[in-house]
Image (cartoon, grey):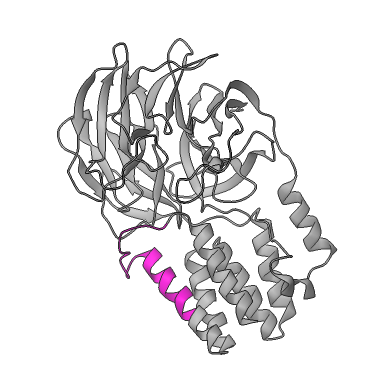
Amino acid sequence: MKTSLIALAVLAAVLAGPAAAQKIDPASDLGRFHALRAEGMAALQKDDRQTALDRLTQAGEILPDSPSVLLLKAQAALELKRKPAARAALIDYLKRGLVLDLGRYPEFNAIWDADLESLQAANTARIGSLKTLNRLTGLNLVEGVAVLDDGTLLATSLRNGVVGPLTDAGIDKRLSLRAGVAANAIAVRDGVLWASTSASRQTVGYAPDAKIVSKLIKVDLATGKILAQFEDKRPDRRLADLHAGKEDLYVSDGNTGEVLRLTGYQGKLQVLIPEGYLGSPQGLVENADASALIVSDYASGLYRVDLGKGTLTRLIAPAGAALLGIDGLYRYGNDLIAVQNGFKPNRILRLRMNADWSAVEKAEVLLRGHPDLEEPSGGQVIGDRFVFVARSQWSEFDDKGNIRRDTPAPVVIGEIALKP
């Protein structure tokens, strides 16, 4: 059985998202979770299954939606001949919308039944409808879109290192960056384009030895002229998702685990969330009165920053929901629209929040199983619509940045309807 347990540990790393370069604070929620899961894995390797189950249960109290912990608990309980407990862990796993490959983990066939199969089938059923706004042929790798006041779609191509309006012919280049550099995320505020830039191995002209500093740039939309640049010259910085807030601009760094703030859209980048607390921060969004910021950590879910007090609190996933693997976050009224591309099938969620954003009350699947929903990425809420990159083309590259095939599936920009 140990081979399967090791495979489950590998699964844990996959579901946790990209490996981060930073060290996690052992006293943080994520640090304590990692330690308990590691202790559980070590106990399993020593055939001390009861200790393993105890440690994994404690880890699950920190991250109840961790797919790896739920499956490891099921495995440990099964080896202890506690089939009801093992089945309960699988039910929890499936009710959170996750899918299990029984061909890869055949040991779970011992407790698999029609009810579990029904839950599994429900998690892959198609939900919602997608309206296609643009299909972009060729290899572009579009990471984000923004909608201008006149309805024009602005897109950033990681492959070509350009940002510009989408036309029937492709991307009308408005901003072009140096070879090997691309804009990871874009936002438009008061007629000005903001973009986070960094070197990318998927970008044409990428050179691994080139000394390139990740930056936040302010661009004149009409001319493409860079009006200002913001950087702190940290060599391992890789600025990614950004949010143009009411008074300040926020940007996440998936490599160091930090979240930065540009106060008043000027001055110096300041660290809002320091290194050591998040594994791979991605999307982030402010509430209506700019009193709180929600940040998505690919590895451990959602965190709330009290912007007045500066405190950081992790939000617990409600029963029947998984908050890991979320990339983009966008506000719709008092709720959040989340792009969850860390699980298969990918999905777009609506997270029902309480009044002050201190808790997620419920998660609803808005879109899942559509053939054009593949590695979705950035978008924007416009009125009662969510416009986003439904197919980004990330699946056209392997983990080393190599192109998988000569004729890629097209980039798809789509929208879904939202209801108040």
Q: Residue furthest front?
A: 406
Task: Give the total number of marks visible in the rendering.
Answer: 0
Say which of 235 and 280 sits in front: 235
Q: Residue at x 29, y 17 (%)?
A: 224
374 relative position to 338: left or right: right
Snapshot quadrant of residue 283: top left
317 relative position to 96: left or right: left
x%, y% of residue 193? 32, 22
Q: Residue furthest right?
A: 114
Say which of 248 and 373 sits in front: 373
The N terminus: image quadrant:
bottom right
Q: Residue at x 26, y 43 (%)?
A: 260
Relative to 354, say whether 84 is above or below: below
x%, y% of residue 152? 47, 14
Relative to 266, say whether 26 is above or below: below
Q: Is residue 204 magenta?
A: no
x%, y% of residue 393? 54, 36
Relative to 312, say whether 134 is above or below: above
The C terminus: image quadrant:
top right
| Region in magenta | 19-40
Q: Residue at x 54, y 27 (%)?
A: 138
x%, y% of residue 2? 61, 81
Relative to 301, say whether 356 is above or below: above
49 relative position to 126: left or right: left
